Image (cartoon, rainbow, N blue to C red):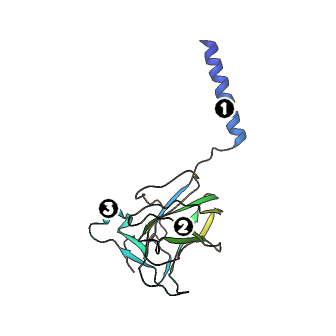
């Protein structure tokens, strides 16, 4: 019995020593905010309220959309900007909760600070979902400007999710844990 306790003590001490050598254990950061919680927004992108009967499918009772219209060549489709404060630096994986109408309205671009726009798209139509994203950005602690950039009309974005957890895949409506504009009501309409 005494030998058993001694072995457990040695193993525990070894693990503690190893953890101290490696530094603090890594934890992932998860940031979720409402797409309608914008700092600025450019037309024709706009904030839209949820219609009756659809409230359980959308977080915050509103979303950002680019209404369907016949887009002319080089016609802008809008941009929403968000000032966000990052407490932990690292590589962040970017997700958007989207609703695409069809193949001519199934993408949006994202960029951080002065970075290049990166497109998020897939072929899932007529339902809210999280398109599989390959977008990743390296962020330092501090304030950053996140851009949601329209690429084509006929899209809706409900939530934006940033995480350092490479393997995390959001599903359904997520509970927001970050407020871009603390004084703005999430359901405010343009």
Mark 1 or mark 2: name the one nearer the start of the chain. 1
| Eye-nearest disc, 3 or 1 | 3
The residue positioned farthest toward the left in the image shown: 53
Q: Quadrant of residue 100?
A: bottom left
Which disc, if any, is residue 180? none
Residue 116, located in which quarter of the rendered image?
bottom right
- The answer to whether residue 153 is above or below residue 136 is below
* Residue 169 belongs to magenta span: no
Q: Contact (CB < 8 A) between labels 2 and 3?
A: no
The percent coordinates of residue 184 (x first, y second) are 42, 73
Residue furthest out toward the top = 1
Instruction: Please tell me in which quadrant of the rendered image residue 49 appears.
Output: bottom left
Can you identify the residue that label 2 sits on? Answer: 120
Disc 2 to disc 3, C-alpha distance? 24 Å
Q: Secondary structure at mark 1?
A: helix
Q: Confirm whether the magenta stretch covers residue 151.
A: yes
Q: Nearer the viewer, mark 2 or mark 3?
A: 2
Question: What crowding class fits label 1: few (fewer than 14 Cα within 10 Å), some (14-19), or many (20 or more)?
Answer: few
Between residue 160 and residue 128, name the one nearer to us: 128
Say the numbered circle drawn on residue 15.
Answer: 1
Q: CA distance from mark 1 to mark 2?
A: 42 Å
Q: Quadrant of the N terminus?
A: top right
Q: Provide the residue span drawn in magenta.
A: 148-153
The image shows residue 185 at horizontal and vertical percentages of 39, 71
Question: Which residue is more in the foreground, 10 or 110?
Answer: 110
Determine whether the residue tagged by mark 2 lies in a helix, strand or loop: strand
Label 3 belongs to which residue? 56
Location of residue 43 with respect to 126 vertically, above or below: below
């Amino acid at each position: 019995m005494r030998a058993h306790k001694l072995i457990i003590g040695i193993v525990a001490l070894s693990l503690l020593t190893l953890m101290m050598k490696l530094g603090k254990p890594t934890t992932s950061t998860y940031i979720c905010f409402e797409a309608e919680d914008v700092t600025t927004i450019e037309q024709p992108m706009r904030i839209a309220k949820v219609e009756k009967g659809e409230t359980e499918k959308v977080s915050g009772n509103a979303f950002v959309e680019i209404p369907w219209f016949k887009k002319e060549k080089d016609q802008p489709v809008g941009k929403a900007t968000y000032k966000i404060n990052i407490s932990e630096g690292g590589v962040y994986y970017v997700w958007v909760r989207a609703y695409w109408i069809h193949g001519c309205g199934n993408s949006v671009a994202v960029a951080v600070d002065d970075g290049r726009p990166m497109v998020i798209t897939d072929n899932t139509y007529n339902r809210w979902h999280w398109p599989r994203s390959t977008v990743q950005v390296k962020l330092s602690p501090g304030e950053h400007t996140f851009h949601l950039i329209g690429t084509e009309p006929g899209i809706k974005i409900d939530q934006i999710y940033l995480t350092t957890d490479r393997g995390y895949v959001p599903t359904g409506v997520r509970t927001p844990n970050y407020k871009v504009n603390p004084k703005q009501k999430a359901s405010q309409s343009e």
